[in-house]
Image (tube, rainbow, N blue to C red):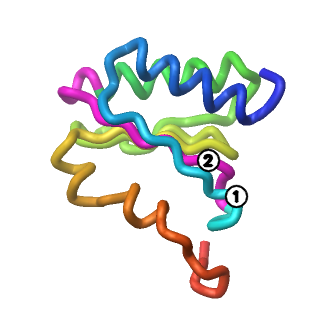
């Protein structure tokens, strides 16, 4: 992949093609040093969430990100796929609503409050 935007778009297409729900991309460039983008999506079941996370991990590895990994392997309700500059959260809808990551990261956060 040429750059992080191409990879982000490929991940979104993969999630969409595999029936992920409510896919949201958040630009983190001016909000955090942990990543450039965060993608949040919902799966319909624990099996669907697992499948989506494995497909995202495969996309990362195909693009050359060999150190990518899945966090939350034992959870049935959420997965985080770490692609270094691109983080992908896949949630069960109820867990997603509970954590409200879109609300947290979509708001402008003053730089002095960011501690990561």
Q: Quadrant of residue 54?
A: top left
Give the x, y percent position of residue 110: 61, 81
SS category of the residue bearing label 2: strand
Look at the image and tell me in which quarter the N terminus lies: top right
| Residue lying at 83% horizontally and 24% vertically, measured from the top left | 2
Residue 14 falls within the magenta-colored stretch: no
Name the foreground residue: 71 vs 15. Answer: 15
Marks 2/1: CA distance?
A: 7 Å
Give the x, y percent position of residue 64: 76, 24
2 and 1 marks in contact (CB < 8 Å): yes
Give the x, y percent position of residue 10: 61, 21
| Residue lying at 27% horizontally and 22% vertically, measured from the top left | 48
Which mark is drawn over residue 70?
none
The magenta stretch is: 34-48
Q: Above or below — where is 29 with respect to 114?
A: above
Q: Quadrant of residue 6?
A: top right
Within 10 Å of the Cα at label 2, are there few (<14), some (14-19), or many (20+) other Cα atoms?
many
97 left or right, relative to 106: left
Which mark is drawn over residue 29?
1
SS category of the residue bearing label 1: loop
Query: Which is nearer the N-term, disc 2 or disc 1?
Result: 1
Q: Above or below — where is 89 with respect to 47?
A: below
107 left or right, relative to 66: left
Which mark is drawn over residue 37?
2
Q: Quadrant of residue 16?
A: top left
View extreme (right): residue = 2
């Amino acid at each position: 992949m040429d750059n992080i935007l191409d990879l982000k778009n490929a991940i979104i297409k993969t999630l969409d093609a595999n029936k992920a729900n409510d896919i949201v991309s958040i630009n983190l460039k001016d909000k955090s040093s942990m990543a450039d983008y965060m993608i949040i999506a919902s799966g319909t079941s624990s099996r669907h969430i697992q499948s989506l996370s494995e497909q995202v991990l495969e996309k990362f590895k195909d693009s050359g990100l060999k150190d990518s990994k899945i966090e939350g392997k034992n959870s049935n309700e959420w997965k985080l796929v770490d692609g270094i500059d691109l983080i992908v959260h896949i949630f069960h809808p109820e867990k997603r609503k509970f954590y409200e990551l879109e609300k947290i990261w979509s708001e402008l956060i003053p730089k002095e409050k960011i501690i990561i």
